[in-house]
Amino acid sequence: MLDAQRALKLLTTHGGNKPALCELLGIDEGDLLDLSSAVSHKAYRLPELPQKLLTELPYESAELRNIAADYYGVLPAQVLACAGSQAAIQALPRLRAKSKVLLPEVGYAEHRQCWEAVGHEICFYDGASRDAVSEALTKHQPEVLVLIHPNNPTADIVAAEDLKYWHSLLPSDGQIVVDEAFIDPTPGHSLTSCLHLPGLVILRSVGKFFGLPGLRLGFVLAEPALLRPLREAFGPWPVSSLAQWAGCQMLADRVWQQSMIRELQVQSERQDSLLRATGLSPRSTPLFTSLCLPHEQAENLALALLERGIAPRYYHQHPEWAWLRLGLAPAESMGRLEQALKDIQEGLPRRAI
Ligand SMILES: Cc1ncc(COP(=O)(O)O)c(C=O)c1O
């Protein structure tokens, strides 16, 4: 019998914890369809590591900065590499005097936790529509606005015009943090063209689109004056030689990137249609499909999927709605997801995994 409390807790914290999921379900890793993380399962294949790399200390690489600037469409001076965008999410709140911070009510919880942990006052907006965020800005008068673009799990995206308008509602020493961890498959949506706005910081993750979260590589994009304190906060050698070298290969490989964008789009559309065919109404990005459901229904669906060896991610921050996020199933496992959803809909008992 599945321990529902433990299961939901596990699906609510970070995704992709395969050992813990398998222990909970009493199954082997090979039998788990882990959709709890939205990292692409089509990882970039790196060439053989030049061993010599590891005999040198990883000072900041100008080559990586230039390649990353080209990939993100910004100037090299606006680029700072870090050990995953999580490192910047943790560091940014420590660099500001106590402020009021406006965050999405539903979203990657680390933002909220990190601002709260060092004593900032937090408040929320509900959904990322122009009106919802504008109203919350007027009501709460924050100094910092956090946007997740596209939001994980709601798939909400932000228009450049809205960003500029919201910026105009902040005080002159205000800050906007835009987390673009999932934007790579839709590069045209990136807000890097707004980087001239004072106080704007954009976070990019290399782990999701390139499928290599274990590399721990991400970037902060901002004006050099904003990057300076972050560089100091990260300390010496924050990014390993392996990550810097891998970043140079992946970010320069335009052929792979273009073909992966197409592939993810096709897979995401397939998964979206599959969910719709079982009567659900997903909101999708090229890296995940999410379902917004009443709490009880979301809980039941999450547990029913788990009983079939399929792990979704579960978000229950919103008082009325819960979100289930499904990373893209590999092509060969789409049938399994489809069958599981049909069985759940028809109330059939689980098959042996
Ligand atoms: C929205 C969002 N931002 C940032 C991160 C951190 O990713 P990383 O540190 O691997 O770049 C995550 C991780 O899941 C995330 O979901």
Image: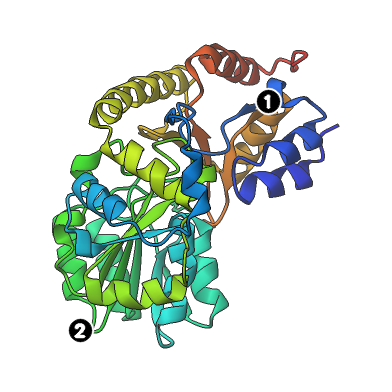
Give, as a three-letter code, the residue at label 2: Ser
At horizontal 49% and vertical 73% (from top left) the residue drawn is 115
Instruction: Report x, y in % for residue 148.
Output: 36, 55
- Specify the amino acid type for callout 1: Leu
Pick the residue in front: 123 or 211.
211
- In the depicted view, which residue is nearer to us: 45 or 190? 45
Discs 1, 2 touching: Cβ within 8 Å: no
Q: Residue 234: x and y, percent?
A: 46, 70
Dot 2: element: loop
Mark 2 residue's CB less than 8 Å from ligand 1: no
Report whether the residue tagged 1 is closer than 8 Å to ligand 1: no
Q: Is residue 289 visible?
A: yes
The residue identified by callout 1 is 32
Q: Position of residue 127 (x, y in %)?
A: 36, 55
- Left or right, 279 with respect to 336, comes to left
Residue 152 shows in this picture: no
Q: Residue at x 30, y 35 (%)?
A: 185
Residue at x 48% of width, y 55% of height: 56
- Image side of residue 19 versus residue 259, left or right: right
Mark 2 is surrounded, within 10 Å at the Cα level, by few (under 14), some (14 to 19) or many (20 or more) other residues, namely few
Disc 1 and disc 2: Cα gap in Å?
50 Å
Residue named by callout 2: 172
* Closer to us: 342 or 212: 212
Q: Residue at x 47, y 79 (%)?
A: 94
**Residue 351 located left or right of residue 138:** right
Considering only vertical position in the picture, is 348 above or below 168?
above
Q: Is residue 183 rendered to the left or right of residue 112? A: left
Q: Earlier in the sequence, mark 1 or mark 2?
A: 1
Q: Quadrant of the N terminus?
A: top right
Query: Element at badge 1?
Result: loop
